[in-house]
Image: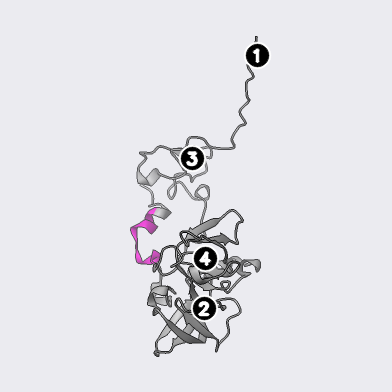
Amino acid sequence: MGNPLRHQRRGKGSPAYRTPKHRFYSDASYSNLPVEACGEVTAFKLDPSKSTPLAEVLLDNGKTVLLLAAEGLCIGDQIEFGGKAGVKRGNVCMLGNLPDGVPVFNVELHPNDGGRLLRSSGTYATVLAHDEETNAVTLKFASSSKVVRILSPNCRATAGIAAGGGRKEKPFKKAGSKFHARKACNKDYPKVRGTAMNAYSHPHGGKSFGKSSCVGANTPPGRRVGHIRARQTGRRKRRERTKTAVK
């Protein structure tokens, strides 16, 4: 009997594959914010679980919250929260109060869910239009001209662009740098090909090449790798259209 497969070991949930949540600062959610408040940015922090830096904000009541930082935000800037917040970089506003053309990030998908969309570094969406009848707000994503979302005007969002843009422009250059970056979040890296393993460790391993990678739907877990219940593999062939002659 061979070794358990890689995804079998991760799915079992041993401590070796557990996410190191004790090193993460915060989820940077809106759920910890008061309804109406203002605060001052006191520091910035880098969370290993996020690509966007976190801004530490000291509120008027003395409490400290962590939020996703906007591009261009500085220490000492004043930030407002709630429906009365002005249209300013870093402010947490309601989508219904934002005019057309304003970039936003960390947008709530549903009211009071804490922020679900556009949380990665450098991402943003533009307020495209407001519906006069339903007051719904249309957002156009910057990643694609075809991605458009219609959301409730009571959803919260941060005005501006998420900080940390251009993160992918600098290459890693070395496998060691990539390894340590993925190791910080305990991600599966590097991924060894099944054909590079021996037959004891993977069904695709061994010196005898040419095994079929297609497996059935009822294959047991130890052999359920490759193309599972595949209808077709390889490149699609262009079907020739047959022309019927009219007599």
Element on which disc 4 rests = loop
Say what amino acid the circle numbered 3 marks: Ser
Query: Pointers 2 and 3 in contact (CB under 8 A)?
Result: no
Residue type at numbered disc 2: Asn
Earlier-in-chain disc, 2 versus 4: 2
Disc 2/disc 3 C-alpha distance (Å) = 52 Å
Q: Which residue position holds label 4?
A: 118
- Give the CA separation, mark 2 to mark 4: 16 Å
At 58% from the left and 81% from the top, the residue drawn is 73
Q: Are marks 4 and 3 in contact (CB under 8 Å)?
A: no
Mark 1 lies on residue? 245
Residue to which mark 3 is pinned? 213
Q: CA distance from mark 1 to mark 4?
A: 56 Å
What amino acid is found at the position of numbered circle 1 in the picture? Ala
Mark 3 surroundings within 10 Å by alpha-carbon count, few (fewer than 14), some (14 through 19), many (20 or more): some
Residue at the front extreme of this rendering = 133
Q: Earlier in the sequence, mark 1 or mark 2?
A: 2
* Cα gap from disc 4 to disc 3, whole angstroms: 37 Å
Foreground: 81 or 169? 81
Closer-to-camera residue (221/52): 52
Q: Residue at x 39, y 58 (%)?
A: 10
Q: Earlier in the sequence, mark 4 or mark 3?
A: 4
* 14 in magenta: yes
**Amino acid identity at mark 4:** Leu
Give the foreground label among 2 and 4. Answer: 2
Q: CA distance from mark 1 to mark 2?
A: 69 Å
Span highlighted in magenta in the image: 8-18
Q: What secondary structure is the magenta-colored segment mainly? A: helix
Q: Which residue is mark 2?
A: 91
Specify few, some or many for label 2: CA neighbours under 10 Å numbering under 14, 14-19, or 20 or more.
many
For this rendering, which residue is in front, 246 or 44? 246
Q: Position of residue 234 (x, y in %)?
A: 57, 37
